Amino acid sequence: MAKPNYRQQKRQKELARKSRQAEKVQRRTGRTDEQTDAPAASPPPAEAPSPR
């Protein structure tokens, strides 16, 4: 049985958290700029995990 790769799991968790925070900031800035236009919510590009 293979050992779990905790470093990879931590990296994935950090990337997911960073993308959620970026989306939250984008929503907040879009809300304060103009109330009539909906902000263009494009998800950030997913980074490929670096092979170590």
Image (tube, rainbow, N blue to C red):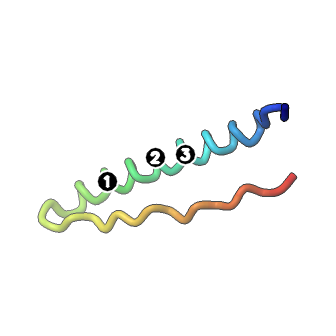
Q: Is residue 21 above or below residue 5?
A: below
Question: What amino acid is found at the position of numbered circle 1 in the picture?
Answer: Arg
Q: How many marks?
A: 3
Toward which corner of the image does residue 40 lie, by quadrant? bottom left
Q: What element carries label 2?
A: helix
Q: Which residue is drawn at 83% across and 56% down?
A: 51
Q: Position of residue 16 (x, y in %)?
A: 54, 45
How many residues crowd mark 1 within 10 Å: few (<14), some (14–19), many (20+)? some
Of mark 2 and mark 1, the one earlier in the sequence is 2
Q: Which mark is residue 7?
A: none
Comparing 22 with 8, the one in front is 8
Three-letter code for the amino acid on which mark 3 is drawn:
Ala
Q: Quadrant of residue 7?
A: top right
Asked if the residue at tag 2 contacts the one at tag 3, i.e. Cβ–Cβ closer than 8 Å, the answer is yes
- Mark 3 lies on residue: 16
| Residue ID at (60%, 48%) | 15
At x 17%, y 68%, the residue is: 37
Instruction: Tell me the CA gap for discs 2 and 1.
Output: 11 Å
Q: Where is residue 22 in the image (x, y as percent from the top left)?
A: 46, 52
Q: In the drawing, does residue 38 fall left or right of residue 36?
A: right
How far is disc 1 from disc 3 in space, using C-alphas?
17 Å
Residue sitting at x 41%, y 52%: 23
The location of residue 34, given as percent across then percent down, is: 19, 63
- Which numbered disc, 2 or 1, marks the residue closer to the eye? 2
Image quarter in which the N terminus is found: top right
Left or right of residue 36, residue 4 in this image: right
Badge nearest the viewer, 1 or 3: 3
Distance from the alpha carbon under mark 3 to that under mark 2: 6 Å
Q: Position of residue 35 (x, y in %)?
A: 15, 60
Mark 1 residue element? helix
Report the residue marked by disc 1.
Answer: 27
Q: Is residue 14 above or below residue 46?
A: above
